[in-house]
Structure formats: C-alpha cells, structure tokens
Amino acid sequence: MDLQSFQAHIQAHNIQVTDHQLQQFEQYYQILVEWNEKMNLTAITDKEEVYVKHFYDSITAAFYFDFTNQVHICDVGAGAGFPSIPLKILFPDIQVTIVDSLQKRITFLNHLAVKLGIEGVSFYHDRAELFGRNEQFRHYFDVVMARAVARTSVLSELCLPLLRTGGTFIAMKGSQAEEELTEAQDGIEILGGAVNRLETFSLPEDNGERNIVFIDKKRKTPKKYPRKPGVPNKNPL
C-alpha cells in the first residue's frame, strides 16, 4: 500500500487525512525502521507492508467507532504504538495512555511522540495485571484497546477492569476472533462486560481477514480481577 492508496482508502470512509498527518506517518515509518535495527519492534519493515498491516490496520477501528470526541483511550500492550498512535495522528483530540511491559518499547514510544510533535499521550512501563489494579486507572478509561496481544479470554481480564462503566473495550483480532469470543463469553460476563458486536472485513490488496470485537462495560469489575501477573494467561476465566 503506497501513500496515495493509504490516503484514498481512509478517505473512502469519510475520514480526512491532511498533508501534515501524512508527513507524520512517513516520519513514524522512518523512526520505526531505524529503531527496529536496535530492538525488536516489528517483523514487518517493508514500507508498503507497514502501511497496510500496521498503520491502516490500526485505523480500521475508526471505521466502526467514533473517535472524533475527546475520548481517553488506554492501549494495552501497544508494542510499537499500534493501534493508538496511528489513531492519535488522525484524531489529535483523543487522549492516549499506553501501558507496555517492556521498558525499551516505552523509551521508543516517548521518543516517537516527541519527534512527531504529539501531545496528550502518556506511557507506562507496567504489567497489565498490575496496572489494572492501580486505583488511579481502574474503572477510568472511556475506551480500552488491544491489538494482537493475546486471546480474547485473556485480554478481557487485562482490559475490562480499566474501563469505566459505559465504556467500550475494542479488541482487534485476526481470523480466529469468533472462536475466541465463544470461549471468552463466560469470563466477559464475570468481568462486567457484554459483547456488543463483531465486525469482519478484509485488508486491502489481499492482506487478510481482520475482526474487531466491541464489548460494552455494563458494571464494575469485581475487585479480585485482574489476577496476579501470568495467571490470566495460564488459567483464563
């Protein structure tokens, strides 16, 4: 996906992309590739692949959810900044909090935000299980997002405790989303959530099926969740 195609596909969904935003994506790509030589941020470094499989894929959430309001997003396990940084570039008014377990990635993200001139972003080096028990952030965010981090049954325990009641958990998944959602249903209910919908689509230029799961936060998550680091992954609800 070249730059012109990237812009055209996004604008086909009534989302405008300015020249300044395109410049930010270009700079994002350059910084990503530069830092990837020093640390493992992504296995994908070809420019056209990064644009479709990272940048565009991250933005697809905005085709199904309104990010034009001043929502506060928490991105759990964002890695190299996906999906929240591409969304922040397109929707500058959103607030973004990223939590990641690796300090090197947090260092990269701080550098990236400074270079791109992005404000209203915060980065935390922490395990998601511990972050979700922090009273400062528990039941706080309007939207919690995760992309390609873990199975939905595990993600739900990491993400739902961070959501305020009435908020939305957005899980960006590959082709196994429906199967994962079926096995996660009981846990989602225990954690105070309810599945709203599943959106299925294909990335442009035959780059595969994607699914986005939307889960509504109906009530506060019981105090015992999330459990200790490592437990949700070893023993999903």
Image (cartoon, rainbow, N blue to C red):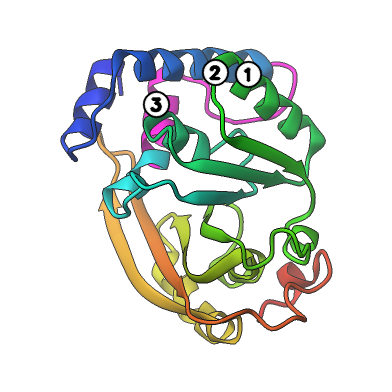
Quadrant that contains the N terminus: top left
Q: Nearer the viewer, residue 49 or 3?
A: 3
Q: Label 1 is placed on what type of residue?
A: Val
Name which quarter of the figure residue 19 lies in.
top left
Magenta-highlighted residues: 37-57
Q: Position of residue 32 (x, y in %)?
A: 58, 20
Residue matched to label 1? 114
Which callout, 2 or 3, points at the residue further toward the start of the chain? Answer: 3
Q: Position of residue 31 (x, y in %)?
A: 59, 15
Determine the CA span between mark 2 and mark 1: 5 Å
Was residue 77 drawn as part of the magenta stretch in this picture? no
Was residue 38 drawn as part of the magenta stretch in this picture? yes
Tags 2 and 1 touching, CB below 8 Å: yes
Q: Nearer the viewer, residue 70 or 197?
A: 70
Residue at image x 38%, y 58%?
212
Determine the CA span between mark 2 and mark 3: 20 Å
